[in-house]
Image (cartoon, rainbow, N blue to C red):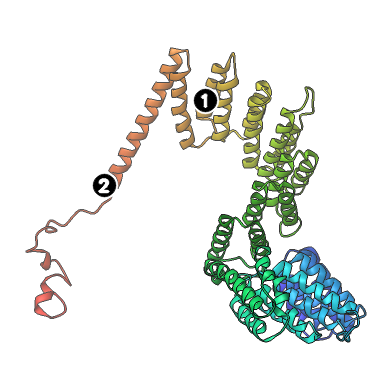
């Protein structure tokens, strides 16, 4: 169907409205399918002015589904800028975009739009215009979020060009401050910017005093104490170079990880295993170094290309929680659950555990209820029931047994659907909870017996029932176990022959270990011995039949002097160099 829709989309200009409607219907029915959007959006982009309203709607709907696709935030911003919204609408789109996916590429476009709207530089003595102030604020936001990224050089270059273009008496000082900031961060452009800063420091007045503001606090006192001029320049240069040496060490440590990153952006295509391994190793290294800010920014970078892998969101949340930041951990899991995992239970189940650990039981219950309603898988049912079981343990006497209600509803659903595997699995878990946690062996026995009546061929169910009786059965348990075993191994039982044999062995063990009736033990042992004897005799007869069917060996098979005379192609044809080997 998708292929047909894409074929329609390229068929020409006739019926564009119908084609757009078909493509929209495909996106609406399967909004998680990236390819359907990639059929719709290019079609609308080629549709001209008539399709502009639908194109805006498509961009917005796509970004709700795939907010980490930074290129489409850029497309939407440029769309708005070209329309009635103008630059203000575009800047608002960029603001939302970098909040969803903070990356160098999108910030470059954001800064570009801000610079375009900055207006002309202010004349000497006049206050700085609002446009210039806004542009500088956008640059500063970019540097705060992604300025320390390995490949942020283009962004720093843009900032420098902006400051150079604004002019003014303090232009060199502003450019020097930006350059020194870039030189003191472990990015691929750090070395280049140290050189730029040193040139400015040597050639331009006022740079040293401005640079002191950028240096770390512990370096400022010595620089301020130096006399203005060459002495202060030397102090600033010495501090900058000393700090840069530390940066060089960090660069060498990070480079092997950074060099292996092949896809720093989000895509729905699977990420190669070596890429995931590299992110894990990179993050582990950052955690070991102990710099919280660096580690958190690395996590934020990681969950863009690795957004579809719950392990990274969970790792991020665990790191925050281990650092005592449970609320921040919860926020990370919520972000992942609302975004890439909004239709998958993985992170929601982790979030439910965090909510429960924080005492937010209603919030945890809401997550489980939504998952049971939307999915109802066996794992989710058990997770939800166990949550309610834990709540019940701390509840006052007489509290509602919600855990049992969850199990019973799910068992009925799977029983009605004839999914015996899920039905049996849940019945075993429910009976175990009733007996071990709620101390209700009679009800647990009833659950097992009902399940055995519906699925009498399940060995695991029979074994669970036996375990229940032996552990919690009390009076009469021995006879109930004996009845269960004998019914299961009876010739009329639907159990497979292999399962019957295993249960027969277990039954004999039971009579030896737990039984009190010697007559029953002798009967069970004799029956098992007869079964094993019959099986052995049948195997012997089968082996004899196989041997009888084998062809008789040639009487000359082991005689090297006679093998060459038995037919064509034998040893007799070798020495003669002819072909045949006749008599």
Could you say which disc has been placed on residue 545 in the image?
Answer: none
- Residue occupied by mark 2: 548
Quick check: 256 left or right of 522?
Answer: right
Residue 320: x and y in percent read 67, 51
Q: Residue at x 43, y 28 (%)?
A: 505
Quadrant of the rendered structure where residue 138 is?
Answer: bottom right
Callout in the foreground (1, 2): 1
Q: Secondary structure at mark 2?
A: helix
Question: Which quarter of the rendered picture does the N terminus lie within?
Answer: bottom right
Residue 276: x and y in percent read 57, 62
Above or below, comparing residue 565 to residue 417 in the picture: below
Q: Residue at x 61, y 65 (%)?
A: 270
Residue 243: x and y in percent read 60, 69
- Residue occupied by mark 1: 485
Q: Is residue 8 in view? A: yes
504 or 168, nearer to the observer = 168
Quick check: 558 left or right of 485?
Answer: left
Q: Residue at x 78, y 46 (%)?
A: 370
User: Which residue reaches farthest right?
Assistant: 84
Residue 105: x and y in percent read 71, 75
Q: Secondary structure at mark 1?
A: helix
34 or 539, nearer to the observer = 34
User: Which residue reaches farthest front?
Assistant: 227
């Amino acid at each position: 169907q998708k292929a047909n829709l894409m074929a329609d989309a390229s068929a020409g200009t006739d019926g564009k409205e119908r084609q757009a409607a078909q493509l929209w219907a495909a996106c609406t029915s399967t909004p998680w399918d990236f390819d359907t959007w990639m059929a719709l959006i290019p079609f609308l982009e080629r549709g001209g002015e008539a399709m502009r309203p639908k194109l805006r709607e498509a961009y917005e709907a796509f970004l709700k589904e795939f907010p980490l696709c930074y290129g489409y935030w850029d497309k939407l911003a440029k769309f708005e800028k070209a329309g009635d919204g103008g630059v203000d609408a575009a800047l608002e789109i960029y603001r939302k975009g970098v909040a969803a996916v903070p990356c160098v590429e999108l910030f470059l476009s954001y800064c570009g739009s801000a610079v375009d709207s900055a207006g002309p530089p202010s004349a000497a003595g006049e206050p700085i215009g609002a446009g210039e102030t806004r542009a500088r604020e956008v640059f500063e936001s970019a540097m705060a979020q992604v300025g320390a990224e390995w490949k942020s050089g283009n962004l720093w270059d843009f900032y420098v060009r902006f400051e150079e273009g604004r002019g003014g008496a303090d232009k060199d000082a502003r450019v020097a401050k930006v350059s020194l900031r870039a030189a003191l961060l472990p990015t691929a452009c750090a070395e280049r910017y140290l050189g730029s800063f040193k040139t400015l420091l040597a050639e331009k007045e006022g740079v040293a005093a401005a640079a002191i503001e950028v240096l770390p606090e512990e370096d400022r006192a010595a620089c301020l104490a130096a006399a203005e001029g060459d002495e202060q320049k030397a102090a600033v240069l010495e501090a900058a170079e000393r700090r840069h040496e530390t940066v060089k060490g960090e660069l060498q440590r990070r480079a092997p990880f950074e060099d292996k990153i092949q896809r720093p952006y989000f895509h729905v295509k699977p990420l190669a295993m070596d890429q995931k391994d590299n992110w894990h190793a990179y993050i582990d290294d950052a955690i070991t170094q102990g710099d919280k800010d660096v580690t958190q920014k690395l996590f934020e970078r990681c969950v863009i290309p690795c957004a579809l892998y719950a392990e990274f969101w969970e790792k991020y949340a665990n790191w925050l929680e281990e650092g005592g930041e449970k609320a921040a951990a919860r926020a990370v899991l919520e972000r992942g659950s609302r975004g890439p995992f909004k239709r998958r239970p993985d992170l929601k189940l982790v979030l439910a555990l965090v909510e429960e650990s924080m005492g937010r039981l209603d919030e945890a219950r809401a997550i489980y209820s939504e998952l049971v309603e939307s999915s109802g898988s066996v794992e989710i049912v058990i997770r939800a029931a166990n949550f309610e079981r834990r709540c019940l343990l701390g509840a006052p006497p007489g509290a509602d047994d919600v855990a049992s209600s969850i199990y019973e509803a799910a068992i009925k659903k799977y029983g009605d659907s004839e999914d015996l595997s899920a039905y049996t699995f849940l019945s075993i878990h429910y009976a175990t909870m009733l007996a071990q946690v709620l101390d209700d062996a009679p009800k647990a026995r009833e659950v097992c017996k009902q399940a055995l009546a519906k699925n009498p061929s399940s060995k695991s169910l029979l074994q669970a029932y036996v375990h229940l009786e032996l552990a919690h059965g009390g009076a009469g348990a021995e006879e109930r176990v004996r009845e269960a075993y004998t019914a299961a191994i009876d010739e009329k039982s639907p159990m497979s022959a292999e399962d019957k044999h295993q249960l027969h062995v277990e039954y004999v063990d039971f009579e030896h270990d737990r039984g009190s009736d010697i007559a029953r033990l002798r009967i069970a042992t004799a029956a098992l011995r007869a079964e094993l004897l019959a099986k052995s005799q049948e195997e012997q007869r089968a082996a004899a039949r196989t041997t009888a069917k084998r062809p008789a060996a040639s009487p000359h098979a082991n005689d090297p002097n006679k093998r060459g005379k038995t037919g064509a192609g034998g040893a007799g044809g070798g020495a003669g160099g002819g072909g045949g080997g006749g008599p």
